Amino acid sequence: MFVDEADLIARGGDGGRGACSFRRKAHVPRGGPDGGDGGRGGSVIFVADPQLGTLCDIVHQALYAAENGQPGRGKNMTGRSGRDLVIRLPVGVIVRDTQTGVVLRDLATPGDTLCVAKGGRGGRGNKFFATATNQAPRQYEDGEPGEERRVHLELKLIADVGLVGFPNAGKSTLLSRVSRARPRIAAYPFTTLEPQLGIVTLNEERSFVMADLPGLIEGAHRGVGLGDQFLRHIERTRVICHLVDVSDPAQCSPARRYAAIRRELELYSPLLAAKQEVIAATKMDVPGAPEAAAALSGEIGRPVLAISAATGQGGRELLLELNRILSAQTQEPGQ
């Protein structure tokens, strides 16, 4: 099950109480105070783990609490510190404070960590309060409570290339042909209900990650269809590969399909719409498709690659073009 949003409460452990104790040993008069400090409470720590791809393991529990620190003991013994609670999250999770809305950390790189709820400091034992005028103190401190924070987790998949287009444009078929991913494929709309990732290997030295996202329709930025649930994942991609179905131009103009998806991207995020884009006309194995692809290129004034995911036509040329753009981005300063 793919889950890309979750809410939880993170609570650090409480610090242990300081001890009130006095040294009592034969032949040692006036032994004095020897109460040790309490242990520190454990913290709740998020770690970005590249082996994970969903938040499904997180949503089944509302409260994540670290271990409390142990109280101090006599003979100046400090209590054991509470164990930290390490929660592993997928790479690409944005951690946001629910109450303030402030982004605490974007776990965009494997190994990124965030201490989301610190443990409380342990209380001081009575030995700490001994002075020249108060040689037998009975004061001690309780441990500080651990920090508690409500957070919202939002996963944005990280991929090099994001496939966008209307439902049944051939995105899943293309991904299954150029990678080992096996997304669900059927002859009806919205067969892809969750993003699918696949690794495209061009040669021994070059590969990139391609993401198949659920089909978009008009009004997706407002929540129509599945669009608003998955548009966020396109924000992480470096290149958009826009697939346009040209198999039936009489039913719906390919240029209109292209313009509709572009409008949804622009309304959702201007930064998303500004990403580099490769346009591919799909289902070229259908009669009349080559003419429709040429007409599409003329209407939008941009080059259009002609491909057929079913037969493999144009697939290699599309991958090489995507690789060329990705390589150019890598060589640019700041990439």
Image (spheres, rainbow, N blue to C red):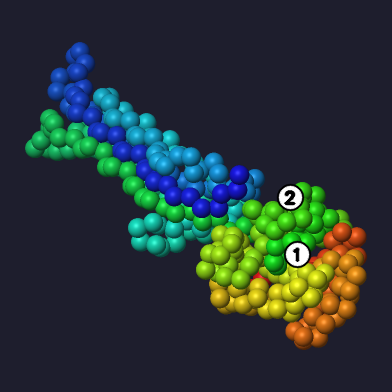
Identify the residue position indicated by label 1 in the image: 169
Q: Which mark is residue 322?
A: none
Q: Is residue 71 above or below residue 91?
A: above
Q: Nearer the viewer, residue 308 or 237?
A: 308
Residue 44: x and y in percent read 43, 44
Answer above or below: position of 14 versus 232: above
- Horizontally, residue 199 falls left or right of residue 131, namely right
| Residue 109 vs residue 217, the one in the foreground | 217
Residue 132 in sight? yes
- Quadrant of the rendered structure where residue 79 is? top left
Give whichever of discs 1 and 2 has the lower sequence position.
1
Amino acid type of the residue tagged 1 in the rendering: Ala
Q: Residues within 10 Å of mark 2 (few under 14, many from 20)?
A: some
Residue kind at label 2, given as amino acid type: Arg
Q: Which residue is mark 2?
A: 184
> Residue at left 58%, top 67%?
220
Q: Residue at x 63, y 67 (%)?
A: 217
